[in-house]
Image: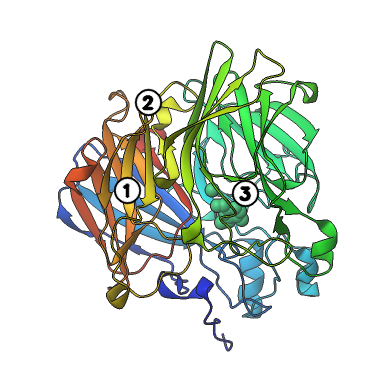
Amino acid sequence: MTTPFPKSPTFLTIDEPFRFEGDLYDLEVEGTIPAELDGTFYRVGPDQAFPPMLGDANPFNGDGMVTAFNIKNGHCDMKMRYVLTQRLAAERAARKGLFGHYRNPYTDDPSVKHLSRAVANTNVVLHNGVLLAMKEDALPYSMDPHTLETKELYNWNGQVTATTFTAHPKIDPATGEMFGYAYAAKGEASDDIAIYGFDKLGNKTWEVWFKSPYPGMIHECAISEHYIVLPLMPQVMDLERIKAGGILFQWEPTYDHMYLVMPRGGDAKDLRVFRAPNAMPGHVINAFDDGGKLYLDLPVASDNVFWFFPDKNGHAPAPPSLRTDVTRWCFDMNDKNSAGVPTVMSNLAAEFPHCDDRYVGHAYRYGFMQALDFTKPYNADRAGPIMGFFFNTFLTMDMSTGKYKSWFAGDTSSTQEPVFAPKSANAPEGEGYVIGVVNRRDEHRSDLVILDAQRMDEGPVATIKIPVRLKYGIHGNWVPSVANK
Ligand code: V55
Ligand code: FE
């Protein structure tokens, strides 16, 4: 590589390119990894392999780099592999960047016109024995869950015709059925949405197509026993803008955000749209329904979180100026004229949640998240400036009250999305561990910490030392070994 990476926020501090694939056998552990932990923590994030062809890139544009932490008998091994996409292979062969702006094929080098632009950098999900590396702008890539070898651009053996698929599918713990959706499902910036269901063997059980109220980003979904919900956010796509070389998304400060609710197994005519004031719905904690009332828990930010997708004047608020409320929405599905009713459960700026996976879609009590606790200090002299996404705390929230128990990672550290691992397959809800990567920003290195989910305030039971720096990851999941044979 003869062109250096730009010295821009996307590529500085903890987000300097890493690009290294490898295995680390038996990481150093301080404390004790609970003997009952037996499984793999998969995570993925962007790690752009070549300097952007057009000079700079936003932090969502990098090539997907997957980490697997295998934990068993009190030990932890680590494996890192790129998703070997068509895009990465082409750039490696050319030894330079060939793809243009985020989700803008009109800015690519002509030599890559026929290739998939997928970078598979947002989530890694195991279903039907296939590890899926996912990003919402394309179909996922399948990988071998044990070797992390990349297999293929995955369309469920021809069952999916949508051109995209979400990075946030949901798996019903009762049936093993996976639900997902595609937006911009008929090509760039299109207002077509498709919802899919697949049984635990990967056979398609449901497909419904409909039009979006406006062609906005739909980053997440939630399932309950009877419904699926798609939060639509006022980040709006425009085909003409990308044809002119511009940015796909533009924040629309006058648009409502919306909750698109579809009965599981429903037709397009069954769609119900709940409008809510301009704001940015975040990641889903969980949803459940009870007697025709549908409850959806998620953080909602007061304004645009994505500083790299500004409004038409190029304006985006400074991230620390945003308010984020952990919100419970109630949608009355029996009253056709009702509006969604929000209740703020906590005004802690908590995000990147998981619930106990055994309760997805069902009444539940606990959410596990990271947060930016503004009351805590940051030592910029030692840890360097803050650029990009920043969180400093892991917590377990009691979703019936909004009260939480938390652990602050320290004034030279930042956190990444944690996952929850139950103590055993039949342990009570929330009995288990919160596991997450912490960046030691002053040491240019990371740790993997394990906390007792019910005793977060007591600090880690184990700190697994990683001798290298892990860039900010996006999402991951805990997969027990018994579910990953
Ligand atoms: C998100 C992340 C993405 C993306 C769109 O967190 C939305 C939201 C890592 O890529 O492309
Ligand atoms: Fe996400």
**Upstream in the sequence, badge 2 or badge 3?**
3
Query: Toward the viewer: 112 or 53?
Result: 53
* Picture coordinates of residue 58, whole percent (x, y): 60, 67
Residue bearing the label numbered 2: 400
* Picture coordinates of residue 25, whole percent (x, y): 28, 60
| Distance CA(mark 1)–CA(mark 2) | 19 Å
Q: Residues within 10 Å of mark 2 (few under 14, many from 20)?
A: few
- Which numbered marker is on residue 394? 1
Quarter of the image where the C terminus is located: top left
Q: Are marks 1 and 3 in contact (CB under 8 Å)?
A: no
| Distance CA(mark 1)–CA(mark 3) | 29 Å
**Upstream in the sequence, badge 1 or badge 2?**
1
In the displayed structure, does residue 73 sit left or right of residue 281? left
| Distance CA(mark 2)–CA(mark 3) | 35 Å
Can residue 147 be seen in this snapshot? no
Residue at 30 percent of width and 23 percent of height: 426
- Which numbered marker is on residue 140? 3
Camera-side mark, 2 or 3: 2
In the displayed structure, does residue 131 sit left or right of residue 308? left
